[in-house]
Amino acid sequence: MKLPNDRMNIIQEILDKTEKEIENMRPVNILIAGKTGVGKSTLINNVFREKLADTGIGKPVTKHLRKISKNGMPIVLYDTRGLELEQTIQDRVKKEITDLIAQNKNSKEAVHVVYYCIQATSSRIEDMELALIKDLSEKIPVILVLTQAIGEPAEVFKQHLENMNLPVAGIQAVMSEPYVISADYTIPAFGLKELVNKTLEIIPEDAQKAFTNAQQADIERKAKNARRWATRYVASSFGIGFIPIPFSDASVLVPMQITLLAHITAIFGISLDKSSIVSIIAAVGGTSSATFLGKSIVGNALKFIPGAGTVIGGIISGTTASIVTSALAVSYIEVLSVMAFKEMNGEAVNLSFIENLMRKQFKKNMQLKGKHLNKKELEFDRTRTASTNYEHLLNQGETEEKKQPFFKRIIPTIKRTVSKFSRKK
Ligand SMILES: Nc1nc2c(ncn2[C@@H]2O[C@H](COP(=O)(O)OP(=O)(O)O)[C@@H](O)[C@H]2O)c(=O)[nH]1
Ligand SMILES: [Mg+2]
C-alpha cells in the first residue's frame, strides 16, 4: 500500500473517497406533488441541503414532471406542475404521475414516498386532489404536507383532514421558512424535522442512509448516525486484534483516518470543499505538508492526554489509538454539525473559525479518553431549539479569534516568576 506523504494528497483522498461512497449509495426518490404556488419549492429548499429546488439540475421526464438531482447528493426528486390548471390538463398530470409510479416500481428509480402538498390556508381540499391522493396511496406511502400552516385555521384544517380518515401514511403541517406577519411578528419555521422523522419511518431501510445524507432539517440525526458508525469502526480497528505499533510507524494509521473521515462525511452529508478540509486537518495534523497525518495526530494527542500513561516507551497501544481516533471522529462530527447548521441558516463559514473549533474540540475530546463516543449526544439538549443547542460550540470557535493581546496574556507568567524569585530570597 502506498502511503500518502503529503497533506494535499490526504485532502484529495478524503474528497475522492467521500464522492465514491455517495455515488455508490442507493438514492432516495421522492415525488413532490401539489398545485403551483403551494410551497413545493420552498419545502424542498429547506428540507434538503444546498437549496436543491434552485440549484439542482432539472430534467423534464414528461410534460408535467421534472426530475431534480444534483451531483454529490444521493437523492432524486420529482416535481409536478399543472395540477391547478383545467380538468383535461389535470387528468394528464395525474396519468403521468401514476405512470411514473407504476413503471418504476421495482427499479432503482422506484419512488419511495410522495409528499402531497396542500396549502393549509386554502382550508379545503378538492375532490380531484382527494381522488389522486387515494389513488397514489394504494401504491405508495403518501405524506400529506400542509404548507404555510398558520395558527388556528391550519389546526382546524388539519383536524378536518384527520377526521376524513384518508389512507395516507401521515399528515404533517409545516412552515418551511419563517413567515413575516408584520415588522415585529414572524412565525418561525416548524414541522420539517417531524416530516423527516415520518419519512424515515416509512421509506425502505436501504433508502434511509441516502435520505439522512440529503436532508438538513435534522442535523442531530446526521451526527448520531455518523457517531454510531464511528463507534463500531474504532472498536473493530483498535480492539483486541490490534497489534501495538512503534510511534515511528504512526503513519500506518493514516489510511484508517482517511477512511474514517471520508465515511463520516458520506454518512453525514454536507457540501465540503477542499479548503474546509484543509482547515480541519491543519487543526489536528500540524501545518507542514510533509508531516504524516498519523504521526502528528498521535504526537499532538500525547500532549493532550493527561499523564500520557497510555503510551509506554513510544509504543502506540490499541487504547491510545482508539482514544485518538475517537476524539478525531467526534470532533469532526461536531465541526460538521456546526457547518451544516450555518449552511442551513445561509451563513458563510469562515475557515479560521473551522480550524479553531476543530482544534478546541479535538483537545477537549482527547481528554475524555474515548469514553464519550457512543454515550455523548453531542451535548444537544432536546428541550432547546437548534440554534441555542449549537451556541456553546459556535462560541468556542470564536473565542480563539478574540484572543487577548500578547502583553495581557504574559502577565500571569510574569507574576508567577516574580513571586518565585521573591520566595527564593
Ligand atoms: N414565508 C414562507 N413563504 C412561503 C412558504 N412556502 C411558500 N412560501 C411562499 O409562497 C410562494 C410560492 O412558493 P413556491 O415554493 O414557489 O411554490 P411551488 O409553486 O409549489 O413550488 C413563494 O413566494 C414563497 O415565498 C413558507 O413556508 N414560508
Ligand atoms: Mg416550484
Image: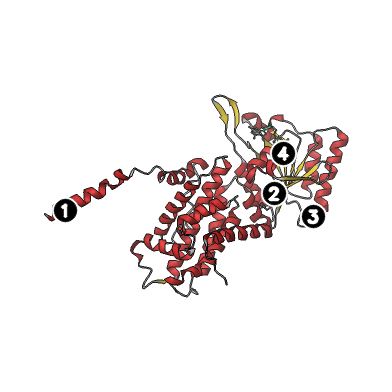
Whether tag 2 and tag 3 are in contact, CB under 8 A, the answer is no
> Tag 3's secondary structure?
loop
Ligand 1 within 8 Å of the CB at mark 1:
no
> Tag 1's secondary structure?
helix
Whether tag 1 and tag 4 are in contact, CB under 8 A, the answer is no
- Residue shown at the point (64%, 56%) measured from the top left: 209
Report x, y in % for residue 306. Answer: 35, 61
Q: Which residue is mark 3?
A: 105
Residue 79 or residue 24, whichever sits in front: 24
Q: In the rendered structure, which disc, 2 or 4, sits on the residue that comes first in sequence?
A: 2
Residue 332 or residue 172, whichever sits in front: 332
Report x, y in % for residue 237. Answer: 52, 69
- Residue shown at the point (84%, 37%) measured from the top left: 90
Q: In the rendered structure, which disc, 2 or 3, sits on the residue that comes first in sequence?
A: 2
Q: Which residue is mark 2?
A: 70
- The amino acid type of the residue labelled 4 equals Cys
Q: Which residue is mark 1?
A: 421
Quarter location, residue 24? bottom right
Residue 117 shows which numbered tag? 4
Separation of marks 4 and 3 at Cα, in angstroms: 22 Å
Image quadrant containing the C terminus:
bottom left
Q: In the rendered structure, which disc, 4 or 3, sits on the residue that comes first in sequence?
A: 3
